[in-house]
Image (cartoon, rainbow, N blue to C red):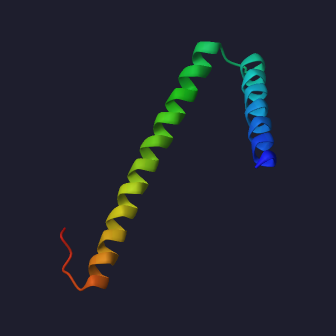
Amino acid sequence: MNKLISWGIGLLFGAVIGATLVVLFAPVSGKALIEGVKEGYEETLEEARQASEQRRIQLEAELARRQGKPRAR
């Protein structure tokens, strides 16, 4: 457990240092960088939601097939 905590602290420390270096050496202004990161995050989140919904539909259909029930949709 101690190794896991040390690993987590190291990961957090590395992420903070990496984020700081990106902000300092990015070729765009801070506001533009933050907006770009926000847009990328929102797009990724939306894609993940869509993929999650598609997978949920697939799993529900598989469950219904295995239970011998007709598909609801």
Residue occupying image coordinates x 32% and y 76%: 63
Query: Where residue 7 appears, x then y in whole percent?
Result: 79, 43
Q: Quadrant of residue 59?
A: bottom left
Residues 24 and 19: in front is 19
Residue occupying image coordinates x 23% and y 86%: 68
Residue occupying image coordinates x 50% and y 30%: 39
Residues 64 and 50: in front is 64
Instruction: Name the side, left or right, on which 16 lies relative to 31.
Output: right
Looking at the figure, which quarter contains the C terminus? Answer: bottom left
Query: Where residue 11 appears, x then y in whole percent?
Result: 76, 38
Instruction: Name the side, left or right, on which 65 lies relative to 34.
Output: left
Residue occupying image coordinates x 47% and y 39%: 43
Query: Where residue 58 appears, x then y in whole percent?
Result: 35, 69
53 shown above or below 28: below
Q: Quadrant of residue 55?
A: bottom left
Query: Where residue 57 appears, x then y in whole percent?
Result: 32, 65
